[in-house]
Image (cartoon, rainbow, N blue to C red):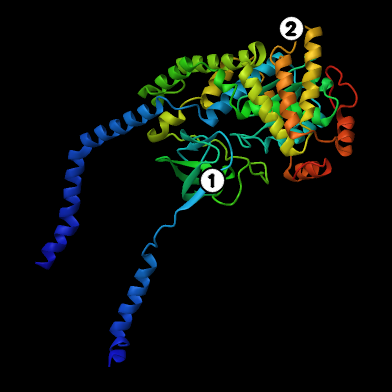
Amino acid sequence: MKGGRTALYFVGIPLLCWALSGCAVTGMDVASIAVKTAIAAADASRPMTDSEEHYVGRAVAARILATYPLLRDQGLNTYLNLVGQALARRSTRPYTFKGYHFAALDSHEPNAFACPGGMIFVTRGLLALCENEDELAAVLAHEVSHVAHKDGINSISQARWTSVLILLGKEAVTRAGVPAELLTLFGESVEDVFRTLVVNGYSRSAEEEADKEAIKILAETGYAPGALVSLLGKMETLSKDRAGLLSTHPPTKERLDSVRTLCGELGTGELHAARIQRFNDILGKPIQQGATR
Amino acid sequence: MVRHLLFRPKALRCWLLASVHLLFIPLPARCEILTVVLDFQLLYSRPDFSSSQVGRVPLGANVEKIQQRGDWIEVMYGGTKGWIHSVAVRPAGSGATRAPIIPIIVRPEPVKERKDDEVALAGKGFTPEVEAAYRQQHPEMQYQLVDMVESFVVDHEALGVFIQEGGLRP
């Protein structure tokens, strides 16, 4: 009797499990499809992930670097990264998928670009407008704010992103390699962001919000928030003289007044001797075209 | 007599077993509340930045801590469960209301591309594979320079010295 019970445990139960598993195959498939459908439904309206933003940002950066040469000046780029990292940790988005990186571009046009994900470029022309580290910090804080607010990514049309999600919902995408349609949508998304950054510029409200956060970042880092006022003042004067430039950061009188009011509330900091010295060491002399150090 | 019975070998075994079992009885869960101290915070489905976003939490919101894994904390907010980076929260009532200062430059884990079907839809958007195909299609793009710029990293110690020497806030 005891032997019969043991046989039931060791032979009968595995047999029963095997039999049941055979019957359950169809049920499992149905469950699997249901789970996938549920995930697809939940994913149909998801925002872009930080890693997806990172890959769009890399492509935008690659496109910018195909337009403007990189200034291969190690001392300058290290300096930009030190100032930039000091600011980024005080922003509303201190971390991104692969962190913030800063670099100079060899262009006389005064401009700066914040690629999605945290790669930030500032041109030789804009660096020449900065008279001290605090003004340089004002430029970088403004660009960090654009990254923090995802202004670049937000320029991708909703219809395009919806098309991406619909495409991702198709079973084939999970099985095969990279579908041509997805590649096209990726390229179009990159173009959307590139056009906003380099050609059309951000909306007025996006610029105002970036100014607001930049002032906050500057004050919290210990830089003079008033540096943004002095820099925008110079850019406004320059844009009157040189039409066509600064198209992506047009400093209007209203914008300048608004920044001045905000800075007035926070008070102005003082320039620090060590900051003046190190700025002059790196940017005291005008950077020549094609300079490598 | 009672004392004698309690210390009989069989009774001792029972006591020992009961004590061991007590170790596994879960204590009433203490709910830890955290306050979100950064703007624009997202909740992620997994403790990494490559996972899908499941919700947003506003600055100043109180969230319920469920568990912690490294730098990530699983929280519940408004009926939504998700992971948030620890830098964005502080214990409620600690008085922290503004953005905390990150003592180190946060370097998230490298991209973890999951292949299983469960996360396929969330992870199969714009991926390294898409970038590779796009790169092949557009050889004019300066991706090698992008890699170079991504290698521009400042040492934590150097940043600390830079901040201190420049009279900036530590």
Tag 1 subunit: B
Which amino acid does the dot numbered 1 rest on?
Thr
Q: Which residue is mark 2?
A: A244
Mark carried by residue A215: none
Residue A109, x across and y down, in percent:
78, 14
Tell me the quarter of the image containing the N terminus of chain B: bottom left
Tell me the quarter of the image containing the C terminus of chain B: top right
**Do tag 1 and tag 2 residues touch (Cβ < 8 Å)?**
no
Is the residue marked by circle 2 packed among few (<14), some (14-19), or many (20+) residues within 10 Å? few
Q: Quadrant of residue A24?
A: top left
| Separation (CA) of disc 1 from disc 2 | 46 Å
Residue A194, x across and y down, in percent:
62, 15
Tell me: residue A78, above or below residue B106. Answer: above
Kindly give the residue lying farthest to the bottom in the view shown: B1
Tell if the residue under mark 1 belongs to the same chain as the one under mark 2.
no
Q: Which residue is mark 1?
A: B35
Q: Residue at x 39, y 60 (%)?
A: B28
